């Protein structure tokens, strides 16, 4: 997404967002997988931080079972990876009940850990690149449940650095409605009235207010004016409306 960028790794998602806001750097975050669903923590962080979405990418994800050099598939007893990656490989793990899934913070990091540990019974699920980089050995390739396995990524900047996009066809927003009958239906009707393509809605709890929710929405527009029209109408009937970004929709891989 930013070919000329210098890569700065971070340990936790909250750390990524903090650096974006404080140091005015860009970040690339996964937001949704076509098999495992949303990365819900990132919806919360988008709402809680002063950042803006500037771009979107769809990436084909291929998972591999990786072991240490010299290990064998039939010897693996523990498999570590990010929980979303483990969820994308449920069928493979079901076919190998002797393997116990073990959640880790990320996919590549799990490869680094098993290689450093040198345990021939420990495996990790990650990319071929991670295996090559850390010196692992691929025991089984393309183990995801379905080949149509894509992850959607956002490119984000701090609001101080982000520039309002003039060429866009997709908008992401967050809003909160009053907790009474009809308010959510009324808000969603705004998108239909403006002839937008509402293609994602996610709800997340409002912290400190049980059973109140923030609704995250992605919608596509054919005319730039429809983006502002939707926002203006929502502001007239919602408690909170936050625009998260305007950007070009990722190219459809199909």
Image (cartoon, rainbow, N blue to C red):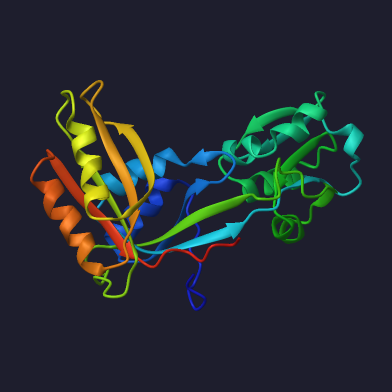
Relative to 124, say whether 103 is above or below: above
Residue 36 image-quadrant placement: top right
Relative to 103, say whether 155 is above or below: below
Depth order, front residue of 30/27: 30
Residue 47 lies left or right of residue 89; in this view the side is left
Where does the C terminus fall, quadrant-wise?
A: bottom right
Measuring from the top left, give residue 244's x and y in whole percent: 27, 55
Residue ID at (25%, 29%):
207
Residue ID at (77%, 39%):
123
Measuring from the top left, give residue 76's x and y in whole percent: 84, 33
Measuring from the top left, give residue 18's x and y in whole percent: 32, 53
Relative to 185, say whether 130 is above or below: below
Q: Residue furthest top?
A: 210
Residue 82 lies left or right of residue 12; in this view the side is right
Q: Residue furthest left?
A: 236
Measuring from the top left, give residue 91's x and y in whole percent: 74, 33
Residue 166 image-quadrant placement: bottom left
Residue ID at (83%, 50%):
138
Depth order, front residue of 224/212: 224
Depth order, front residue of 232/85: 232
């Amino acid at each position: 997404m930013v070919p000329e960028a210098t890569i700065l790794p971070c340990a936790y998602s909250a750390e990524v967002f903090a650096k974006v806001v404080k140091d005015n750097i860009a970040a690339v975050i996964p937001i949704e997988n076509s098999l495992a669903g949303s990365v819900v923590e990132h919806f919360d962080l988008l709402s809680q931080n002063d950042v803006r979405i500037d771009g979107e990418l769809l990436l084909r994800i291929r998972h591999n079972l990786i072991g240490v050099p010299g290990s064998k598939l039939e010897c693996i007893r523990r498999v570590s990876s990010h929980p979303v990656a483990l969820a994308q490989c449920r069928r493979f793990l079901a076919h190998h009940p002797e393997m116990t899934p073990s959640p880790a913070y990320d996919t590549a990091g799990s490869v680094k850990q098993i290689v450093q540990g040198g345990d021939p019974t420990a495996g990790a699920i990650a990319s071929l690149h991670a295996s090559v980089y850390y010196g692992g050995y691929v025991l089984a390739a393309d183990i995801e449940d379905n080949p149509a396995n894509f992850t959607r990524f956002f490119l984000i900047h701090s609001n101080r650095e982000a520039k309002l996009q003039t060429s866009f066809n997709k908008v992401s927003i967050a809003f909160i409605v009053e907790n009474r009958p009809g308010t959510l239906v009324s808000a969603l009707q705004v998108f239909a009235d403006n002839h937008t393509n509402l293609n994602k809605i996610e709800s997340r709890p409002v912290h400190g207010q049980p059973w109140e929710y923030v609704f995250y929405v992605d919608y596509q527009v054919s005319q730039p004016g429809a983006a502002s029209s939707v926002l203006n109408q929502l502001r007239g009937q919602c408690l909170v409306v936050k625009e998260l970004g305007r950007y070009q929709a990722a190219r459809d891989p199909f």
